[in-house]
Amino acid sequence: MDYILQQSLNALQLGSIYALIALGYTMVYGILTMINFAHGDLFMVGAFFCFIVATFLKLSFIPTLLISMIGVALLGVAIERVAYRPLRQAPRVSAVITALGVGILLESVMLVIFPYPQSVPTLLPNITWTIGGVTISLLQVIIICLSIGLMLLLDFIVRRTMVGMAMRAISWDKVIVPLMGVPLNLIISVTFALGTSLGAAAGVMYSQAFPVIDPYMGVLIGWKAFISAVVGGIGNIRGAMIGGFILGAVEIMVVAFFPSTYRDFVAFTLLLVLLIFRPYGILGQPRPQKV
């Protein structure tokens, strides 16, 4: 039983990171109905922001987290303005190709700056508690609590604020809503800023839990976060949270009871099976088609 509880705690930690990244995918899709395939690489940039700030500025965890989130949010807004905004009326495949290109560009730039894997300084004290047979670290508590706090804050913003109301209105009809005085470009920029800042927060926490980072780390993790968003229902914020925790639990339990080489196989099989029986995800709904 203690072993199961220990693995459940690990699943919460991993699922928290997946859920934060998945929220970026689902927010952009909900507003623009496009998949920002560069989002996984923005998560990677967040981890490198953490490395740079912690190594050269030698700041503590909270300032490092805030600087990383703000820096990546500004980068996300700039990418949307330069790469995605001119393609809003273009075929969707053009936006997909551009997003993939932006991701490759980010990887290449980081590879030029950091050609070798980097070790991120530890920003939190190595404190652990043992309750029964379960070992809990301060890092795990902070990752889980901070992630859930950020998710609840985002849910509040989307459901209870004027900005969130504008986001939901634009996701419903991005043609009519701007005619009613809603600033379309500003709301889309805010959406990218929120989504990418959460990805950066996930990158900072991931770099503390797994302190060796490299420019390609965002590829596989980004795909898994995308799976989380699809499992929960792409475009649904609460669905993305649920999907992240489900995928984290599946991966940890597979590694706990089977060879670790089965982990990715099970993760992608989960996506395929879900798409067969529930094409719109757990909380997703089919979008109405305007004719």
Image: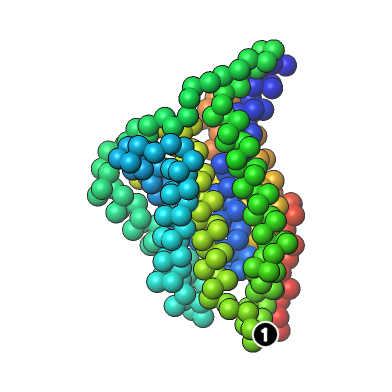
136 up-or-down from 204: above or below: above
Quick one: 53 or 194, which is closer to the camera? 53
Expressed as whole percent of the image width and height from the top left, the position of residue 242 reads 69, 46
Q: Quadrant of the N terminus?
A: top right
- Residue ID for mark 1: 180
Determine if residue 218 is in view: no
Q: Residue at x 54, y 73 (%)?
A: 186
Place of residue 159 in the rendered image (x, y in percent of width and height, measured from the top left) = 72, 61
Circle 1: residue type: Met
What sort of colour scheme is used for the picture?
A: rainbow
250 to the left or right of 34: right
Indicate whether 103 appears above or below 34: above
Q: Residue at x 43, y 49 (%)?
A: 67
Towards the viewer: 91 or 244? 244
| Residue at the (58%, 30%) spot, across then down | 140
In the image, residue 64 lies at what x, y percent?
43, 43
Quarter of the image holding residue 94? bottom left
Q: Position of residue 3 (x, y in %)?
A: 66, 17
Query: Left of 212 or right of it: where is 241?
Result: right
- Circle 1: element type: helix
Residue 86 is drawn in which quadrant? bottom left
At 35% across and 55% down in the image, what residue appears? 106
Quadrant where the C terminus is found in the figure: bottom right
Q: Residues within 10 Å of mark 1 (few under 14, many from 20)?
A: few
